[in-house]
Image (cartoon, grey):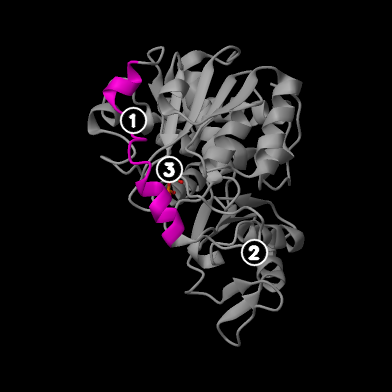
Amino acid sequence: MAATDLRGRDFITIMDFDREELETILETAFDLKRKFIRGEPHELLRGKTLFMFFYNRSLRTRNSFEAGMTQLGGHAHYLEPEAVYTPALPGEEKAYATERIADVARVLAEMGHGIAIRIYGKPTGWIYGKGRLIIQEFARWARIPVINMEDDVDHPCQALADIMTIMEKFGTDLRGKKFVMSWAYSGSVEKPLAVPQGAIMIASYFGMDITLAHPKGFDLDPNILNFVQKNVKKYGGSFKIVHDMDEAFKDADIVYPKSWTCQPTDGKTPLDVEKAKALFEANRHWITTVEKMKLTNDAIYMHCLPADRGMEVTDEVIDGPNSVIVEQAGNRLHAQKGLMALIM
Ligand code: CP
């Protein structure tokens, strides 16, 4: 393992980390997973507390952080922003309903060892980047690590679990593997860009041949695309964008088809829900079927969950032999334990 000291670091975006640091987190995650399977004690965070703010609902993220802190000998507090005083940016406070983030962050830092936040979509008025601003404000004031549990830009903890799952299937040398991040149809347009952006970013550290596939109008943030392009120059592999799902799936080793919305990324213009619905409906054929999977190189099927069955993917595929969705969700626990053990 690399001698990388991550103690005290925030984990807000994959972009803030280099390959060696990500490998250190992953190696720790694999080690803690082995200990979990063998029933060996690993209370590396005994007596420590993580405070978790969820502005959005969650099954996997909440339970993996809570269970992870318990297994590491600490404790996680679940905080509903509405049930405390909703943490607010300066100028957005409402008397006795909200509390300035500067105060919330500094007070919690007196009492515990980490703050984790999920915020995107509706609580931000669907303004791209607003969730990120809120998490950065926490990080500015808290003298303890701040963890992004998904904002409008990135879902870095999901990305760690994604690459961990890929490494379990293909080994740690991923050079030459074709990784396809594809858009998929959903009956809901309220889907942030965070998961596909996090997935292509983390894939770009490991020399894979990355194909991003989506119908026209579903572009990701240009800053993320530039970052991926620069990373493949630095670490090897390739990156291309196509607008045809069949073309993308051809000879793929890994397919990760999931829905995301057609959200402006200028940080000013909110999501136009009616326009998005029309664009989604025009692309109902972007569904992963057994026939599409036959185009691949016997690829593994990935999804961060929850999945919209019958829309994003057929039951036959998601419940089929190539689906790794349950291991992928389980790896949220191990990846985040590796992360927390190193930064908290
Ligand atoms: N993948 C994921 O973040 O799941 P939850 O929304 O259930 O936390």
Q: Is residue 279 magenta?
A: yes
x, y percentage for residue 264?
Answer: 59, 54
x, y percentage for residue 280?
Answer: 39, 48
Q: Could you tell which of marks 1 and 3 lies nearer the N-terminus?
A: 3
For mark 2, does the 10 Å Cα neighbourhood hold few (<14), some (14 to 19), or many (20 or more) residues?
A: few
- Residue 270: mark: none
Residue depicted at 52% across the width and 75% down the height: 84
Range drawn in magenta: 274-294
- Residue 111: mark: 2
Residue depicted at 37% across the width and 35% down the height: 286
Name the side, left or right, on which 200 lies relative to 254: right
| Structural distance between the alpha carbons of marks 1 and 3 | 11 Å
Amino acid at the residue labelled 2: Met
x, y percentage for residue 134?
Answer: 65, 62
Nearer mark to the viewer, of 3 and 2: 3
Amino acid at the residue labelled 3: Ser
